[in-house]
Image (tube, rainbow, N blue to C red):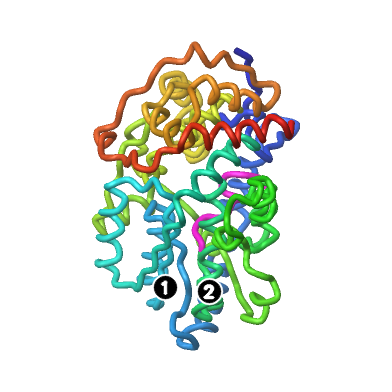
Amino acid sequence: MSRLKRCTKCLLPETHESITFDETGVCSICRQVEFKEGKIDWESRKRDLSELIESHRGLYDYDCIVPFSGGKDSVWTLYYLMKEFKVKPLVVRFDHGFLRPNLNDNTTKVLRNLGADFISFTPNWKVVQKLMLQSFLEKGDFCWHCHTGIFSYPMHIALKFKVPLIFWGEPSAEYTSYYSYDQPEEVDEKRFNRFVNLGITALDMAVRLGGDMDERDFKPYTYPPLKELRQLNYRSVCLGSYIPWDVKTQSRIIMDELGWQGDLVENVPEQYNYEKIECHMQGVRDYIKYIKRGYTRPTHLASIDIRHDRLTREEGMDMLTKYEGKKPASLEIFLEMVGLTEDEFFEISKSHTVSPWKLNVFEQEAGTKLPDFNEWTREGKMKREDAEKQLENWKRSQ
């Protein structure tokens, strides 16, 4: 197992996407957070936010659209906009197919306590399965359908309902270096193509899958035409570009005010029960990241706490040793959903390893099942012959 260079301040490794290090070994994400906390006039940013909202208030059926997963960030975004600015929002959810029971309960609590109109879209599962397997084969990331759907479907709803203002949660500068905090981050087609869709468009997917599906099946994953969005005079922005983002404080507030409840996540310390609770495939996603990049969510969470002096670097390293790299119980469900064997899963994951990381995955110990594991849906298993067809096509293209 190889050793990775890590930030001298936090614990992010050299395999973290978009990361760079300065001459002192401090990573670009730490420097961005320093800029956020010391260089931005947040009072001025909040005035800009107020002006943006007031320029749209009352002109349409809804003041804004809030894309919504039910996790901490989207709930905080909705809560803040409704409580602080009294907006009338349209809440839009793209259901990726793996919502956990507690997440659905949270959604009901939040929407009833705040009082907001809600649209939820669940895409064709047969299509989702093929997209999951194809993106896993090509990028070592099965979440293409989720990320493209989450960021494109609300834009289609904005056009359909003629609501030009869309509010997302935290900016990407909080966790990556694709953008910085220098100016408010626009959540637009450029951003979508830069890292959301992994460099694969919906049209690319249609071609790769060989015409097996109706082209209309790809619309939820396709960013709307820029011409139509410009005619709408749209603004798609991150709330976290206008107010300082603090996940721990925000999570406590929505728990106290809305009854939002945290949950355990596979191979994540229980004190972070607010983090990524919405998807029961999160453990598999983290496990793939460990195979590919040598770190998982505890590194990310420890790094945030280290930057805010809530954790020492040594305590963070102890946490990583204890929690990272364990095989999640949810892997067996994932393999059923995409029709793969465990050996094929390891082979594909390892083919996407980011240098200089190298791992012998067969040495990893198993994680424990979470209390709600038996409630996670296992309906809709992929037929082995369908998986073999995609797998064979992928191998021929290599």
Query: In the rendered structure, which segment of residues is drawn in magenta?
Result: 168-178
Can you tell which mark lies on residue 158?
2
Q: Earlier in the sequence, mark 1 or mark 2?
A: 1
Q: Is residue 240 magenta?
A: no
Q: Judge whether 178 appears above or below 45 on screen.
A: above
| Residue visible at 64% across and 43% down in the picture | 31
Q: Secondary structure at mark 1?
A: strand
31 lies above or below 238: above
- Can you name the residue that lies furthest to the bottom here? 59
Quadrant the C terminus occupies: top right
The answer to whether residue 241 is visible is no
The residue to which callout 1 is attached is 90
Residue at 46%, 36% (x, y): give it.
383
Q: Secondary structure at mark 2?
A: helix
Q: Is residue 82 left or right of residue 110?
A: right
Q: Is residue 348 left or right of residue 106?
A: right
Amino acid bearing label 2: Ala
Return the x and y of residue 364 as percentages of the image width and height.
47, 15
